[in-house]
Image (cartoon, rainbow, N blue to C red):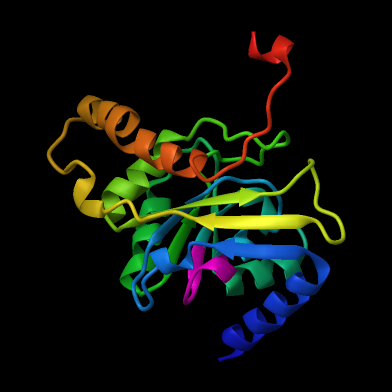
Amino acid sequence: MIYTIAMLIVRGVLHLWYDLKFEGRKNIQKGKPYIFVSNHRSYLDPVLVALAGYGRFGFMAKKELFEGNKAFCALIKWLGAFPVERGSGDMQVIETSADCIRNGKNLLIFPEGTRSKNGRVGKGKSGVALVAAKVHEDIIPIGINFEGEKLHFRSKIVVRIGEPIPASTLPDTENLTERELLKTLRTEIMPPIMDGIRNLVDEPELPAEIKE
């Protein structure tokens, strides 16, 4: 109840501070947990995705966030964050991710692993595909759009919710060798996840010299 009231207050404050719009909420079924995958533009992204969905969330956050201010650490833990050390290949993260779904929570992942400063969607990390394959739950792609590098008062934010990527369309990874698993993650699981996000993001046009 406290979480629900807090989110209602946060929703109201954000609508007053920003020009905030959600599109495609019809693609989310109430009472069903999902894996939400989103592009990463700002520190506000976990809150925006949580407001887009229904129910509580668990989400990965870089380990460094849990090593600073104790009050902030306690807050993000209460909101559902759990630490992950980037590039470590920690299998405990997969178990924690699976526990979120088993306990009826949604799971939020930022496949890029870091925030984009230019608004373009980067390359997804294969570890995200491994979590998706192991947890085996429907995936909801999210596109967060706003102009400029940083948010400011009355920034227009559009959060687009895409159609689910059914878990049934993901290949079975149970009996694969490590080499086969890595290839499957890279070629069959990660591409539709990243394509789902890119289809929802208004990526800025790059200058000609960068394109080249």
User: Could you tell me residue 158's position as x and y percent?
Assistant: 64, 56
Q: Is residue 116 visible?
A: yes
Is residue 148 left or right of 64 when viewed as pictured? right
Give the residue furthest to the bottom.
1
Number of callouts in the render?
0
Q: Quadrant of the C terminus?
A: top right
Q: Residue 128 vs residue 20: left or right?
A: left
Q: Which residues are magenta?
A: 50-58
Residue at 71% x, 54% y is 43
Q: Residue at x 71, y 48 (%)?
A: 146
Instruction: Tell me if residue 89 can be seen.
Output: no
156 in the magenta segment: no
Instruction: Choose between 35 and 199: the one closer to the eye.
Output: 199
Residue at 67% across / 71% down in the picture? 74
- Left or right for 167, reference 64: left
User: Which sits in the foreground, 2 or 9?
Assistant: 9
x and y percent of residue 104 in the render?
A: 36, 74
